[in-house]
Amino acid sequence: MDSVVLLQRQLVDYTAQLFNEGFLDDQFNQLQQLQDESNPDFVVEVVTLFFEDSERLLNELAKALEQQSIDYRKIDAHVHQLKGQQLQKVCIAFRNYCEERNIEGCQKCLQQVKNEYSLVKTKLETLFKLEQQVLAAGGSIPWPM
Amino acid sequence: MSSQAFEKRKETLASMCDERARMLQDQFNVSMNHVQAMSILISTFHHGKNPSAIDQRTFARYTERTAFERPLTSGVAYAVRVLHSEREQFEKQQGWTIKRMDSFEQNPVHKDDNAPKALEPSPIQEEYAPVIFAQDTVAHVVSLDLLSGNEDRENVLRARASGKGVLTAPFRLLKTKRLGVILTFAVYKTDLPSNATPNERIQATDGYLGGIFDIESLVEKLLQQLASKQTILVNVYDTTNQSHPISMYGSNVSDDGLEHVSALNLEDPFRKHEMRCRFKQKPPWPWLAITTSIGILVIALLIGYIFHATMNRIAKVEDDYHEMKELIKRAEAADVAKSQFLATVSHEIRTPMNGVLGMLHMLMDTDLDATQQDYVRTAQDSGKALVSLINEVLDQAKIESGKIELEAVQFDLRAIMDDVLALFSGEAHEKGIELAVYVSDGVPEMLIGDPGRFRQIITNLMGNSIKFTKKGHIFLTVHPVEEVMDSVDVETESSSRNTLSGLPVADRRRSCAGFKIFNCEGSSHPLSPSSSDLINLIVSVEDTGEGIPLEAQPRVFTPFMQVDPSISRKYGGTGIGLSISKCLVGLMNGEIGFASIPDIGSTFTFTAVFSNGSSNSNDSKQQKQRIKNQCHTTPSEFQHMTALVVDPKPVRAKVSRYQIQRLGIHVELVSDLNQGLSSISNENRVFKMVFVEQEAWDKESSISAHFVNSIQKIELGFSPVLFLLGNSLSSSRTNTATSGAYTLSIITKPLKASMLAASLQRAMGGNTGNPRNGEHPSLSLCNHLVGRKILIVDDNRVNLIVAAAALRKYGAEVISADSGKKAIKLLKPPHQFDACFMDIQMPEMDGFEATKRIRDMESNGHIPILAMTADVIQATYEECQRWGMDGYVSKPFEAEQLYQELSRFLQPPSTANS
């Protein structure tokens, strides 16, 4: 039991940390809210979907930027979708560069977005791993926070 | 004016000229007479004596000495008549030859040199007239033959022929070079008769006496004697030859100015002379005209200047005006920006807040212990308070940016009043405040207007009242304006101590004293018959709170203005509620006002204009009918029953009657239990129920037992049910009241028709109604969603899955589409969908475009399409409507919002066509 409590505590702390750092916001809570018995893996599903989408977008962005003649409109659309996800600040800069047709800026931003993305991914994966551990240890997940 | 002056000048000139001419004439005559006298002297002493008594020396001396008598002559000379036959002898006698004058005249220079020897002797003539005597001044002419000079010859011939003095034409005098004339008299040997013929005269001629008149000096001297010599210019002309007048005096200035001509008679009929005078100076300036014109000029200049200055000023003012306009524009822009900012920020806050509230809501449903429940409820309440506050700010911002628009839907005012009452009943109950609502019968059952905003105003006022009231009551009344204006009872009601709780209140009359609608009452009836479709309501909220300090009263309606900062610390709130209310009232064409007395209470009153939602006329019977119809939600089993209300206070009794009547029950009022008893014992009356006000019950506890007994005595089946109308204060006594043998039901105030109905049903053995007032609205909405087929369109898979999950949770069947095209395909009629949520920003085809196409496809029926957007600024909402969308929900989704929006479009399942 102690280990479960410990794990739970760890999970709560970690989640709180993610909220504080801005990796999570109340949308995450809303997602949790939508998860129930009939749909126990809802949050993980959504997040996985998000990662898939983001990875696809990032790949397409990278590809688009490697082209000889860059289709900025396409990039802009991709970035807009990305922005729809979480990476607001960098994306705004990205779009600005896009409007300026600044390829170096775009590439720099893409790199930043990639970094951010992998950071988020790592964090969330850690979170889900923790959740799994808690569940495996027989505890319940103390959602929503 | 100038012609007058001209005439005057002319007259002056004429008189001056005539005067001078006369004087000149006179003096000339004097000189001429002397010359004539001298001719007689010569005749007497030269020709009359032999030898002659006169020689050149004598003559010269005599003439010299008598020169003063001939002031006008520069000299006199005497020439004798010598026939050619006598020439030789004469020349011998005299010792000089007769000399020719014309050569002399041709060389006048030589004459000055006085060299007579150089002169030629006169050629042979028939006769000669050599000068023998001459005054010294003209001594040079001695020996000259006068007949050889043109002028002189003519003169001599005329003189001897006429026997009178004759004048030559003016000529330059030999020595002085001045203009002169020569006067010649003939000297005869014998005295001739006056009628002698010229021939006789010529024969008798002895010689000729000539006087040289220096006309120039003559006139000059004469003029010098006269004053005002300078003013006029005198010219004297010899006008014998009219076409060529010879100037005798005066400079020959050609001047076209004013001139006067006076004739001069110089005693020579052959010659004519005249004097022409003119003013030396030009006529003086017409000063009056000049000053007048200068004055006019100055005035014109001044006017011009004034005009110019005015123009300048106007231009300046215009410039200022433009500047002001610019400033206003900027200020307005800043204001709009501020409002936009407020709208944005409040939205930004609202979004996460909705998350928080949603979570709390979910949390409530989980298994919690009492403490946790309490915490969660507190958190939720706080959250709700925060959201409502943000909504207020948002409202204010919307109002300020003019983006608020009122709806015009049909609504039931009484139901809204009930809602408001329900909203505050909890708090009122806690505080022990009596809460009551009264809606006049004159208010139509259905009205058309914006119920949400109307409710907001009332909620604001009520919220304020309840915040500042610790004891007493809060009384909400609604009347048509006409009723208040001409009813007296409303006035007496508030002016006396006869109030709901017995505490004094601020006079409502004063709260609306400033209303225009009342002020124009005197002249004409404020509501013309044509506006019968418009209902002007007057709503007032009366409380017995602490009132508004007098100094704070003027700024009550100013946004963010609270009485003092300590208020917000003590009671919370932003202080914009009243300001919003005022704006909203303004939008409803109403007015708001208040009267407040510190420590007694405040009464806020406002008017609002609605359209009559009931097509029926204002007939009172029909109205009652409608009231009954309105209560179709409550069982109609109470209709046509009669109830007795025992209440010592008429106001409160009226409130009770209003609520009970809404159930279709006829109500009779009595003021105390004794009267009630007598009413009940009356055989003709059958009361199904009796409502006794707690106050009356407690006051007359002795009678109450008796009252209960007497009720019980009434035949079974007819015995009325007894209700105690209890205030929240007396809730503790519920037990004692029910301890009696008789079933005594307690109805806790505030009274509300629905609750009343439930209580009645329970007490009268009917089916058990829902004891709670109204159910949670979202619950029914959730039910609405069960089995509904809803399409969600979003290119973002994450959004799609989230929204779908949210809706599925409430039993809806959700189909997802990830592009506008797919949505169009799915919604091609006929389809089974009840509603559609559409993302706006999608690649290929955005939500607007897709909606437009879907709308184009729709032949009959209209599927509600709601936009999903991250932007809540009004422009987007308008955009949504423009493209045929029905509404919007903002991302990220919040369950309540989804349901609320949907509920507007989904009919209850029974009437839905699926």
Image (tube, helix red, strand yellow):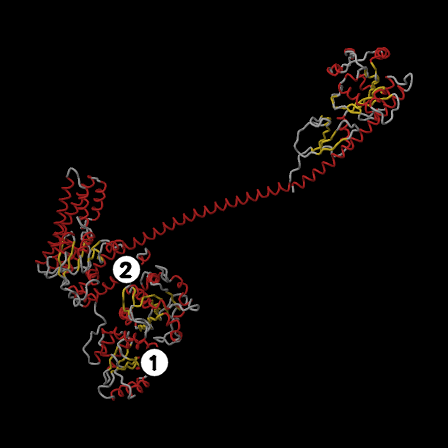
**Is residue B566 among the parts visible in the rendering?**
no
| Spatial separation of the CA atoms under disc 1 and disc 2 | 43 Å
Quarter of the image for the C terminus of chain B: give it.
bottom left
Q: Are marks 1 and 2 in contact (CB under 8 Å)?
A: no
Q: Position of residue B392 (x, y in %)?
A: 30, 60
Number of marks drawn: 2
Which of the marked residues, 1 or 2, is nearer the chain's N terminus? 2
Q: Position of residue A136 (x, y in %)?
A: 8, 58
Q: Which mark is residue B199?
A: none
Location of residue A92 with respect to B242 vertically, above or below: below
- What secondary structure is marked by label 1? loop
Foreground of the two, B745 or B476: B476
Residue of label 2: B391
Q: Position of residue B475 (x, y in %)?
A: 33, 72
Label 2 crowding class (10 Å Cα cut-off): few <14, some 14-19, many 20+? some
Residue under circle 1? B648
**Rendering quarter of residue B490:** bottom left
Q: Please determine if labels 1 and 2 lie on a single subunit.
A: yes
Q: Nearer the viewer, residue A105 or B858?
A: B858
Tag 1: amino acid? Pro
Disc 2, SS: helix
**Mark 1 surroundings: few (<14), some (14-19) or many (≥20) residues within 10 A:** some
Q: Pick the quarter of the image with the N terminus of chain B.
A: top right
Q: Residue at x 17, y 63 (%)?
A: B363
